[in-house]
Image: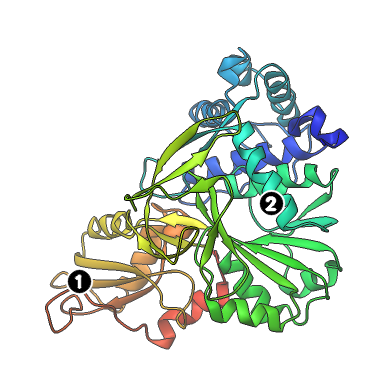
Amino acid sequence: MATPLQRIGWWCVPGVLERFLADLIADELAHLRPGGCAIPALPWSSGMLLDEEGLGLDSLERMAVASALNEALHLHESGVEDLLLVRRRFGDWVELARLGLDHVSQRLTFRTSGSSGTPKPCVHELASLEQEVDFLSELLAGRRRVFSAVPAHHIYGFLFTVLLPLRWDGAGVQDVRRVTPQALAGLLAPGDLLVSHPAHWALVARHGGGLPPGVVGVSSTAPCPAGLADQLIGCGLQRLVQVYGSSETAGIGWRDTPAGPFRLMPHWSRPCGDDRVLQREEPQGGQRTQPLQDQLDWCGAVDFTVSGRLDQAVQVGGTNVFPDRVRQVLLAHPQVQEAAVRRMSPDEGERLKAFVVPRAGADQQVLPDELARWVAQRLTAAERPKAFTLGDRLPVNALGKAADWPCRRSEVGRAQHEGALGP
């Protein structure tokens, strides 16, 4: 049976739509201003101006941000989207979005968090998302408060910090993205749910100390190393539920054992004879075929492991990043002849690293600092390599294929100090 809050719609719960819009706008501005520009700290007041001394939106930024909001909430289907270009305060945009959702709320669009330059829009029926949350509410039953280290406008954050609390009759949600791990441990209490991603979980395990008993965690957006999951349980976490899915699919599978297989959520099934797709039972009836982005190795009808991505993306701080795009930005530097970009190994850090072959005559003493400034002006925080290694040729193995390379301690020290997404 639906709770009273479920019946009024997620956008009518006090503070929820404000949190969704603020996260979406801040994320869009981060992409529009890759060189870095101050964005007011969240939460935002309803009276905050969108231009001038507030967000400082110019006309092009206002159009881009309004378009992103229109796309996410399908405001064009209710006819209020043009008013976004004339209203001047954040609270005005919240009220316009609420008005639009009062009329049309059946679908939402989430964009992939990838950094390929053309993020992909993924349309989801609200009824399908609620179907998943029905399962999650039982899987995680008994939670009384939700602590969130993820943005509400990404599909993972929307499912776990917007829709899921409604199943628990409006469990309180607190944003902890700007709370230190030490302080976070003091906020948590038995019965709480902490929704996070592996890069943040690593900081909690390293610096959070002992966690109160009875706290359950959820991790998604990237693989959680078994050693990290074990470490979190050792710190006192009662249970860590790992969710496998994507912006295209929402949640597909889950597990709560660090190195065990994932299990399909009940609305997904594996069709016979084709390991490249899954089938989804829709809440209104019928089935939908969903192509897979990852290689899944099956351990039976419903259990599987993930052996790798098919689109060559890697995860940095919960964001899909494409190393080849980063490589192209480095190759555009006049003193770079060749480059390779990879995610750091677990013992090196949580960021990207780059191996650079300088052009003849390049000053190798100052080139790493120049490259750091170069990428800071052209890439988002998650995309920027945090270690630059120089050499005469790119690393290869005995078969002549591209190989990994170790970072010197001096190269990775800064990345480790800055944590998941330092500037």
Residue extending furthest toward the top: 79
Residue 243 makes an appearance in the image: no
Q: Residues within 10 Å of mark 1 (few under 14, many from 20)?
A: many
Colour setup of the view: rainbow
Q: Residues within 10 Å of mark 2 (few under 14, many from 20)?
A: some
In this rendering, would 17 be left or right of 266? Answer: right
Task: Please tell me whether mark 2 sits on a helix, a strand or a loop.
Answer: helix
Question: In the image, what residue type sits under mark 2?
Answer: Leu
Q: Quadrant of residue 279?
A: top left
- Residue 31 at what x, y percent from top left? 48, 44
> Which sits in the foreground, 125 or 1?
1
| Residue at image mark 2 | 136
Question: In the image, what residue type sits under mark 1?
Answer: Pro
Mark 2 in CB contact with mark 1 (< 8 angstroms): no
Which residue is pictured at 28% across the width and 57% down the height?
A: 324
| Residue at image mark 1 | 358
- Residue 212 at what x, y percent from top left? 83, 75
Residue extending furthest toward the bottom: 409
Residue 178 badge? none
Q: Quadrant of residue 12?
A: top right
- Residue 281 at what x, y percent from top left? 53, 38
- Residue 188 at what x, y percent from top left? 83, 67
Which residue is pictured at 41% across the width and 53% down the height?
A: 379
> Which sits in the foreground, 20 or 398?
398
Measure the alpha-carbon separation of dots 2 and 1: 51 Å
In this rendering, would 318 be left or right of 405? Answer: right
Up-down relation of residue 283 to residue 35 (above or below)? above
Q: Earlier in the sequence, mark 2 or mark 1?
A: 2
Image quarter in which the N terminus is found:
top right
Up-down relation of residue 91 to residue 78 (above or below)? below
- Between disc 2 and disc 1, the foreground one is 2
